[in-house]
Amino acid sequence: MDECDQVFWHLLNSGTEVQKRRVSVLKNLKQLVQNVLGSEHGKIYLSSADVSDTDVKYVLSLAGEYRVNPFVIVNNYRHVAGNCYNYSGSNPKNLIAALDKAISKGGHHLLCCSAQKAKSKWGTQALEERFRRKFPHLRILRIDSESVADPSHPAMGCIAHLNEILTEYDLVIASPSLETGVSIDIEGHFDAVWGIFQGVQPVNSVRQMLARVRETVDRHIWVREWGMSVVGNGSTSIGGLLRSQHVATQANIALLSAADNADLSYIDQNFQPESLQTWGKRGSVINVEMRRYRESVLGGLVEDGYIIIDANDADNDESKAVIESVKAASEELYTAECEAIADSPTISDAELKKLQDTRAKTKTERHQQRKAELSRRYEIDVTPDLVEKDDDGWYPQLRMHYYLTLGREFLTNRDAKRAKAQLEAGQNSIWKPDFNKGQMLPSVLLLEELNLLQLLTPGVRLRGSDEKMQEFKALALKHRYVIKNYLNVSISEKLTPIAIAQKLLAKIDLKLN
């Protein structure tokens, strides 16, 4: 298993196709390890620059009764990594200003981004548009999950022969689809590697991405101070992370049994404790790194042999111009995309199914698919405004509002169906983190317990000093750990009753005016 730490984390936590069949996949992995170790010629090789005790212990725990003494080969070779310029600030404007200057002098550059959507100001699409406007003569190649699967795009299928293709471009802008498994060995082409990391990838992935170009050239990076994505409830201890999952699973099963009068005692809640333990170990490390994202990335780069140098800030006029140009490019691009989706022709269910099953899609086909999915999801006319609301997470908010009010009587049925589907896929076993994500009953009961709907009486003025608002705050504080666990909303003593109300109402897309 090459890049074994990433393979394991992908199997344990990823939201891709694996998620639908995670229990079977993990069963197969365990069976595979035991088959290999049970045969006389079987060997298991794990390799990765970031392999840790956790990975080795995981494989040993999957081995069951097969006792193996692992043999470890450590590669102490440290290549000369060179200088890494670190840009400060709450956004990457100083880095982009420096890249502008470098491009003006000529040369070739690779820019790594952690986002690709048109809506993301510092993502691959918006930055490509911005650099095209500023430097019309520049040969730019964008490599991201969309461009590499678009038959009409020059990046289509480029990952297989990167070293030949990249030399034809002055600026290459890449998303994490270039994170691992590729090696850029061209010498004398790239003058520098630039990186904008917004806290969505694990720290190791950032270092992997910067190391794709093997040559010792300067690295320039901007890293967000703290990360944006956390595992589970964000706990930084293995115990805290696992306990929150166990408690949630038991609560979910108990609530389902009570509401549905069903006997759910046959559910195997203790599926592969060794895998769950590994999920907890890795998850808590990622959560710690996310809390100190910039610091963790820089620490890792020092270990990789880079010399970290604090870069100079651009002057105010320059950085202001950068912000304005990036904002303009991203807003125009995103507006155009929302309009293109809304204006796409309507397609039949059969055509939609065909598009969903196709990997390589042109922009037009992607827009058609998105429109079809939106019209089936909301059952209203698809307008640019609806596309934007959906991107902002409108659907989960509406769904929560519905099950809290009109659809309350259908909630148990919905959760029971979800649970049943997972149990069928896992042959009566469940993977706790996935199972808990799929259940809505606890969140709705929690909002009922907090009596959130009392705030929705039109025309009533609420003041933080009102007795019922004081009670509301006391109740929210009392349940704050449960609220964090199920609704992912942080409640603290410092917040006023009104601020707490606004945070919870945001869950159903409402606010007090």
Image: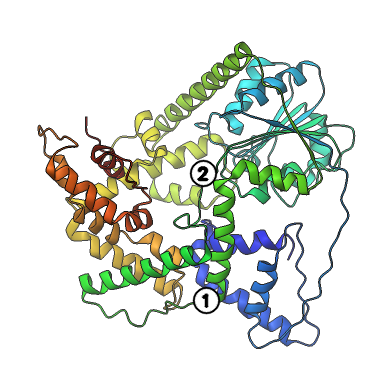
The x, y position of residue 478, in whole percent, is 27, 56
Q: Amino acid at mark 1?
A: Pro
- Residue at position x 43%, y 68% in the image: 243
Q: Is residue 269 above or below residue 239?
A: below
Q: Amino acid at mark 2?
A: Met
Residue 405 vs residue 454, the one in the foreground: 454
- Residue at position x 39%, y 42% in the image: 372
Residue 310 vs residue 197, the one in the foreground: 310
Residue 377 visible in the snapshot? no
Q: Is residue 303 above or below residue 238?
A: above
Secondary structure at numbered mark 1: helix
Q: Which mark identifies residue 273? A: 1
For this view, does 305 lie left or right of residue 231?
Answer: right
The x, y position of residue 475, in whole percent, is 22, 53
Residue 512 visible in the snapshot? yes
Q: Which mark identifies residue 228? A: 2
Q: Is residue 185 above or below residue 169?
A: below
The x, y position of residue 404, in whole percent, is 21, 52
For this view, does 387 lie left or right of residue 61?
Answer: left
The x, y position of residue 364, in whole percent, is 52, 34
- Residue at position x 17%, y 48% in the image: 471
Mark 2 crowdedness (10 Å alpha carbons): few <14, some 14-19, many ≥20: some
CA gap, disc 1 to disc 2?
A: 28 Å
- Quadrant where the image shows the N terminus: bottom right
